[in-house]
Image: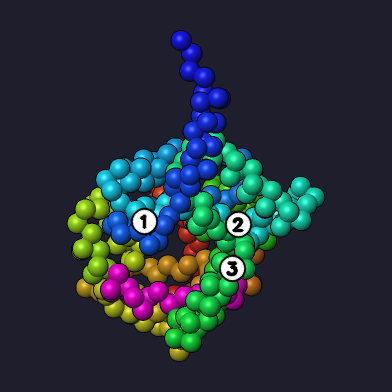
């Protein structure tokens, strides 16, 4: 006996759609449950990673429906920014046309899989109705002094012309473009989440059902350290190098001070030292992922300056 999936599944998919089986009805008296998986990037095609990810969320959504909950299980599209523009250029299409056509194609694929999404709450992050709210939130952050501009070092993809997170740099290359990533200092907008570091750290103690390793990752990401700022005078000058240490009691045994490749003093020295300039360039092409940093060979360059301990 064979399973006639084409006819049978189309029948039930049509029944789901006609009866709005999975639409969220806000005025229901049932207890509410919100089930959300991360929104996909509308590349135009689903792959097995999508099937796995959204099947897990769908099982949870259906479980709570069967428990009598009014479940909001929405679907949306992470469709804003340079990736869509670069893909449109590559495919000789307008970003809007390319994105909307991909969304329509992936919507059909999701519906063919029978996932229980509340399509009446669908959204796309490239739509003004959505990003208008983001702009409004940004202005509120700005008014509160939480949004500010500052210069900082970033991973720059020279092909996509965009900044990459450390996790998007694989073996020194952009995860999408495969171009060699450069270190650049850019003036950019930042959010002052450090104002909430202590609150975030303390509230981790409330997550008693989270896996211990996940909580530890969050603690490390917040990265609170208690220590002292020590000033080492540069020999023969009135200037200092300032160092942070969690163990000031061990300074009696200090034998050198290490500068980051991006330290202003390093940059000044490299202007008159071609070997140092080459070493700095090599450092800038090193992977910034935490796992790679932990296992990377430790390299250094001895300068001709001394500090006084």
Location of mark 3 (residue): 129
Q: CA distance from mark 1 to mark 2?
A: 22 Å
Q: CA distance from mark 2 to mark 3?
A: 13 Å
Q: CA distance from mark 3 to mark 1?
A: 21 Å
Foreground of the two, 218 or 47: 47
Residue at image location 53% in from the left, 72% down from the top: 133
- Position of residue 52 measured from the top left corner of the image (x, y, whole percent): 44, 37
| Lateral position of residue 224 relative to residue 305, left or right | left
The quarter holding residue 116 reads: top left
- Position of residue 237 measured from the top left corner of the image (x, y, whole percent): 47, 86
The quarter holding residue 106 reads: top right
Q: Can residue 150 be seen at all in this image of the molecule? A: no
Q: Can residue 52 be seen at all in this image of the molecule? A: yes
Along the polypeptide, which appears first: circle 2 or circle 3?
2
Foreground of the two, 299 or 103: 103
What mark, if any, has residue 34 been given in the picture?
Answer: 1
**Front position among marks 2 and 3:** 3
Q: Is residue 198 magenta?
A: yes
| Lateral position of residue 192 relative to residue 220, left or right | right
Q: Is residue 111 magenta?
A: no
- Position of residue 206 measured from the top left corner of the image (x, y, whole percent): 21, 63
- Disc 1 crowd rating (10 Å Cα; few below 14, some 14-19, many 20+) is few
Along the polypeptide, which appears first: circle 1 or circle 2?
1
Foreground of the two, 289 or 137: 137
Location of mark 2 (residue): 79
Along the polypeptide, which appears first: circle 3 or circle 1?
1
Tell me which segment is drawn in magenta. Answer: 186-200
């Amino acid at each position: 006996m064979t399973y006639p999936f084409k006819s049978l599944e189309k029948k039930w998919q049509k029944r789901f759609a006609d009866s709005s089986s999975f639409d969220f009805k806000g005025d229901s008296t049932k207890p509410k449950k919100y089930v959300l998986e991360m929104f996909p990037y509308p590349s135009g095609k689903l792959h097995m990673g999508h099937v796995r990810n959204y099947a897990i969320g769908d099982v949870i959504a259906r479980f709570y429906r069967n428990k009598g909950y009014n479940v909001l299980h929405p679907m949306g599209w992470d469709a804003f920014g340079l990736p869509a523009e670069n893909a449109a250029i590559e495919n000789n299409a307008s970003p809007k046309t390319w994105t909307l056509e991909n969304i329509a194609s992936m919507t059909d694929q999701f519906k063919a899989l029978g996932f229980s999404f509340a399509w009446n709450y669908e959204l796309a992050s490239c739509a003004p109705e959505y990003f208008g709210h983001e702009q409004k939130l940004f202005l509120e952050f700005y008014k509160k002094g939480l949004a500010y501009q500052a210069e900082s070092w970033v991973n720059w993809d020279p092909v996509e012309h965009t900044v990459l997170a450390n996790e998007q740099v694989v073996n020194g290359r952009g995860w999408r473009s495969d171009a060699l990533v450069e270190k650049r200092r850019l003036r950019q907008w930042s959010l002052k989440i450090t104002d909430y570091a202590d609150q975030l750290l303390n509230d981790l103690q409330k997550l008693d059902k989270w896996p211990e390793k996940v909580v530890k990752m969050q603690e490390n990401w917040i990265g609170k350290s208690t220590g002292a700022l020590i000033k080492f005078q540069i020999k023969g000058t009135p200037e200092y190098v300032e160092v942070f240490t969690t163990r000031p009691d061990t300074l009696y045994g200090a034998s050198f001070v290490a500068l980051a490749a991006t330290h202003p003093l390093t940059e000044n020295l490299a202007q008159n030292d071609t070997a140092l300039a080459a070493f700095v360039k090599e450092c800038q092409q090193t992977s910034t992922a935490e796992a790679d940093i932990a296992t990377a060979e430790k390299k250094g360059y001895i300068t001709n300056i001394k500090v006084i301990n």
